[in-house]
Image: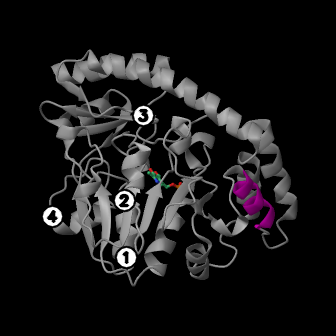
Amino acid sequence: MPSAGMPKSSVILECMDLGFHGDLEVGSGLVDLAVNVRRAPMPPWLAEPVAASLADLAAYPDSAPATAAVAARHARPTAEVLLTAGAAQGFVLLAQALRGARRAVVVHPQFTEPEAALRNAGHEVTRVLLPAATGYALDPALVPGDADLVFVGNPTNPTSVLHPVEAVAALARPGRVLVVDEAFADTTGEAASLAERRDLPGLVVVRSLTKTWGLAGLRIGYLLGPADLLARLAAVQPLWAVSTPALAAAAACASPAAVAAEREIAAGLAADRDHLVAALRGLPGVTVEGRPASSFVLIRLDGDGERVRLALRDLGYAVRRGDTFPGLGAGWLRIAVRDTATTDGFVPALRKTMEA
Ligand SMILES: Cc1ncc(COP(=O)(O)O)c(C=O)c1O
């Protein structure tokens, strides 16, 4: 694994870089602006069932109740839900089960694990790069017509751009599997989610409970899609892949009260994000990219981004490097939205490094 400060240039390193994630930036004593996982104690309605599930660990996991709860949340039959050990496992199942795809396309810049999973399963990957000049807007015409397996993120990590429903939906067509990574959809209040769309052919929506609920270590997510396709994915999933505590969390987070809480968290996040964006826009040499809609903001710096990132570490702040994302480079940094006090400490530090 490359370390946070490691330079990169070779092709070999480029492959390794697909496996670089924000947690590798974090270090002791650093304020973590690199990982987009919300840091808040679990609410009692979540902590209690997860803790209670520990009493059942002698039994193999039973995914039926959690599957039913998730299906009810998204108004789908249970056969259209597959619980997974995080969204990350969903990418691997898709890549493995769909080895017969003729042309796999990944729309970048985006989270790198879908491409890594595809490559590991032997797919050749065509990259579609959305240009910074258009604010990383999704133009469906950029995706080759013969692509029969397409991955797009919405909202997208690392750009924080939320593509309109129509643009994403326009990518669906018979004979194509369209995978929409909605790991951060809850951070937008589900603004452009396709989770409940059953009319789009071949649509698979990838969801995660990692981000808003701070459950990265539990490993829980799910796929929503046509029953026959999910059955193919389930066939390559390891048996009992989702643990009993993770199932308890999935059921709890699917309740109407949890969904209402999610919306409130998203509203608070939007206010914190506005605060961060306004402060960043006041800094010379810093451009806020696109129109941030999620729990992180992508910036582009005039000058040497690598120097700035390392200087920020010296000042106690870990931010996410941009150069491991296809389509970006060292001049881009991704910053997690935190509370306003943290932002008010960070932005002057960034100004200082820019002026140095
Ligand atoms: C866009 C995106 N999708 C999926 C994931 C993986 O989520 P999970 O923790 O559910 O595997 C991440 C994690 O960083 C992500 O950024």
Element under label 3?
loop
| Mark 4, residue position | 10
The residue pinned by badge 1 equals 120
Quadrant in which the C terminus appears: top left
Q: Where residue 290 sits in the image (x, y, percent)?
A: 29, 34
Name the amino acid, label 1.
Asn
Observer-nearest of 39 and 269 = 269
- Identify the residue position indicated by label 3 in the image: 293
Along the line of sight, which residue is nearer the eye, 118 or 145? 145
What residue is at 16 percent from the left and 19 percent from the top? 355
Relative side of 190 to 113, left or right:
right
- Point out the tag, 2 or 4, that comes first from the N-terminus: 4
Q: What stretch is highlighted in magenta?
A: 63-72
Q: Which amino acid does label 4 sit on?
A: Ser
Whether label 2 touches label 4, CB < 8 Å: no
What is the distance, in whole Å, between disc 3 and disc 2 at their CAs?
21 Å
Q: Is residue 70 in the magenta section?
A: yes
Q: Quadrant of residue 127?
A: bottom left
**Pointer 3 with pointer 1, Cβ within 8 A:** no
Of tags 3 and 2, which is closer to the observer? Answer: 2
Residues packed near mark 3 inside 10 Å, few (<14), some (14 to 19) or many (20 plus): many
Q: Which of marks 3 and 4 is nearer the N terminus?
A: 4
Identify the mark at residue 171; answer none if there is no mark: 2
Q: Total number of numbered labels? A: 4
